[in-house]
Image: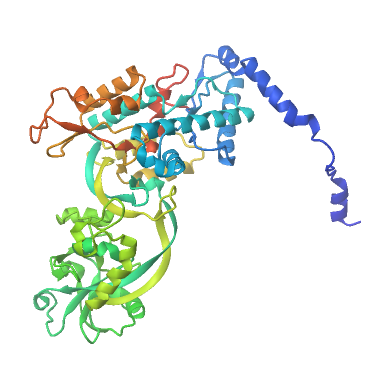
Amino acid sequence: MDIKDKIKNSILLPKTDFPMRGKLPETEPKRIESWTQSELYQNIQKKAGSKRFTMPDGPPYANGNLHVGHVLNKVLKDIVIKYKSMSGHRAAFIPGWDCHGLPIELKVTQSLGEKRKQLTDAKVREICRKEALKWVETQKKQFIRLGILADWENPYLTLNPEYEANEVRVLAQILRNGWLYRGEKPVYWCPTLQTALAAAEVEYHDHTSPSIYAGFTLQDSESVVGLSDKPVSFVIWTTTPWTLPANYAICLNEKFDYGVYDTGSEYIVIADKLKESIEKECELELKHIKSLKGSELEGAKASHPFVDRESLVILGDHVTLEAGTGCVHTAPGHGLDDYSVGLKYQLPVFSPVDAAGKYTEDFAPMQGESIWDANPKIVELLKSKGKLLGYKQITHSYPHNPRSKTPLIFRATPQWFVRMDGDEKSLRQQALDAVENKIKFVPEWGKQRLKAMVTNTPDWCLSRQRVWGVPIPVFYCESCEHAMADADIMDKVAEHMESTKLGIEAYHQEKPEFFLGDKKCPDCGHDKFKAGQDILDVWFDSGVCHTAVQKQKEELDFPADI
């Protein structure tokens, strides 16, 4: 008998017809029921020592049955809490649920179908509320069945009026600190659901896009590059031809060497180090004529290939030699780097695309056309103008909405942001100081990971164009659209939400003058306002649980132990 047979014979395998030992499917529910009947959790809290241990429970989302991720999360927390309780600590476990947001609204909207158009927003919020509460009860039973000891009779729900009110109070404090602002800058936008998304929400999936090389004819080429016998073009590369109508500049890197190359029919300007890849992609044979530094080309002007507009040659550090031509198509209304460098050169933030991802009258030739359908038409337009140097279809990683599973675009729209940078007391600097000096990390490598996240995170886009969520209580002048963002007014809204026990409905049911009194628009003096309908990103809901729960509950301390 070899070693494998010895091991096999030494293992006692269970017989398939033998019942589970201990009859756990029968005994476990009885044991858990006895814990509930005897109020085991409450008695542990009463008999615990005086030293507290605080672990705020980040809320799961109330929109489905539990999965293994929920089990891992709650069981690990339960182990920590039980260990601390057995060690003599008073360790409270107050569970909670995240109840607002797009996933619930999307599920309700899909179930309503065409009927949604006949219902008021208030009715949709009511249905969303019922949907969330249904899953709260379902998940609660499932968590209890896992043997988790917690204060299940008194959980916190982000849809409770007092929680919603505290959320608005936190927003008011952010405004007082000077961190909340409204800006028209490019954000991730979902044309399918017609709402903004924050960078943290985005998923990446393969997507097929047109990869094109297009020419922008240099004006006054004699004075810029010393050549005038043939047209001279800056060549850009892009996988989003639909953004070309919004182009206002071509961005170079001041330190790169840019070559002027003869194609036979014209001269083109590209980064010297990308010559070989461009020859291959565009099937060209390029003859080098001369080279200039990017800094020497700043301020030159080129003609847009199919719009009667100039494109300014500008400089930016974000331009790399990883791909493309070293000459970056710049549309400040449709890209973050484009927006940032555009501010420096005072370029227009132009976005001729509506919420549904269709061209507006600002690009009349294709007004009403979906940007996805317009891509091949833009390619044909470039070809007809003699400005298309190269074209093929590529599959690449592209941002998608995790809810709708559809591709996103960058689109400049007025949104509310949390400002990360400013003076030495900026939010980013305070967060980095906390990471560096106030938090103990186990394991230690977590420190560097969080530090990198805080260092690189952009301003947080807080606003969403949806119905089911906590409103951003800002009032807009009906005459000039000025946004009346006032922390004291936000506090008044919060107080009304809590005192009436109506929560977010208290905001929607009252007329603006109820909160504003006799205030007038500081810009135009008008006294009529409309209530803002944007809601807060659902991550803001769960993010304020430290204030809305941890600082409110007598059983919990601040800051947390874990």
Residue lying farthest to the right in this orientation:
1
Q: What colouring does the structure picture have?
A: rainbow
Image coordinates for residue 424, horizontal then vertical, percent: 24, 38
Residue, x 20% and y 33% (percent of image)?
530
Furthest toward the top, the residue is 46
Relative to 289, residue 483 above or below: above
Instruction: Compare residues 152 and 103 and report the one nearer the observer.
Output: 103
Residue 458 appears in the picture as rendered: yes
**Numbered-mark total:** 0
Question: Is residue 419 in view?
Answer: no
- Tell me if 87 is positioned left or right of 300 in this view: right
Q: Residue at x 31, y 32 (%)?
A: 471
Q: Is residue 20 above or below residue 110?
A: above
> Residue 230 falls in which quadrant of the image?
bottom left
Residue 357 percent coordinates (x, y)? 31, 55
Where residue 172 sits: x, y (%)? 27, 28
User: Where the N terminus falls, by quadrant?
Assistant: bottom right
Query: Residue at 12% of width from left, 39% of height from top?
Result: 480
**Which residue is rendered at x = 58% and y = 40% of the image?**
67
Query: How far across and how far down the image is residue 210, in percent?
Result: 36, 69
Quadrant in which residue 29 is drawn: top right
